[in-house]
Image (tube, rainbow, N blue to C red):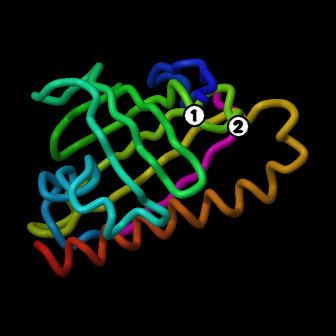
Amino acid sequence: MWFNVQPAALDYADRAPFRLRAEAYVHAPPHRVFEIVTGEAMERWLPDFVALRWTSAEPYGVGSTRDLDLRALKVRERVLAWEPGRRFAFTIVETSLPLLVQMIEDVHLEPIAARVTLLRWNVHYAPKAPLRALHPLARGLFGRLWTGAVKNIAAYALENG
């Protein structure tokens, strides 16, 4: 069963009631980090990863869709920004659990040196009203998920260029 999530535009970041941010220095150029962030070896860097399926045809870009399966949750996403080497953002449009009103994830890549990129993964969201009482616990769990993912991306890039 799928639960609708209100699609959001990039400007949702300015008004979202909650935010998470994870960042790391990745020893790879921005275009390489973009390849990793958009799905390469996701099973190696995303905690609880099960599967990723693009549900729109290549070439991928703004408007493309994909399904991401994690152990406890499945999400359907629509790409909002696709700027190789600079930015990748998407909105959640459906989930397998009724958790969210709205959500976007916005990844920024900033070149720091010839082979070093600052990766900033920003999450902007609103949980459904009945879940707000549990929000501090959920925020801690999901915060660790993103922090772990960003650290894992840095480790993966170091090993795999």
Query: Is residue 18 a member of the stretch shown in magenta?
Result: yes
Mark 2 is surrounded, within 10 Å at the Cα level, by few (under 14), some (14 to 19) or many (20 or more) other residues, namely many
x and y, in percent, of residue 22 in the image: 49, 60
Mark 1 is surrounded, within 10 Å at the Cα level, by few (under 14), some (14 to 19) or many (20 or more) other residues, namely many
Q: Quadrant of the C terminus?
A: bottom left
Q: Is residue 61 above or below residue 89?
A: above
- Which residue was labeled with disc 1? 95
Q: Is residue 22 above or below residue 101?
A: below
Residue extending farthest to the front is: 1
Please count the marks in the image.
Answer: 2
- Which residue was labeled with disc 2? 99
Q: What residue do we see at 54% from left, 27% from top?
A: 94
Q: Examine the image and state in which quarter residue 119 appears.
A: bottom left
Q: Quadrant of the N terminus?
A: top right
Q: Is residue 62 above or below residue 150?
A: above
Please give the range of residues in magenta.
15-24
Q: What residue do we see at 49% from left, 53% from top?
A: 70
Q: Examine the image and state in which quarter residue 15 appears.
A: top right
Q: What's the amino acid at mark 1? A: Thr
Q: What residue do we see at 16% from left, 67% from top?
A: 28
Q: What's the amino acid at mark 2? A: Leu
Left or right, 4 with reference to 48: right
Q: Nearer the viewer, residue 110 or 133?
A: 133
Q: Examine the image and state in which quarter residue 149 appears.
A: bottom left
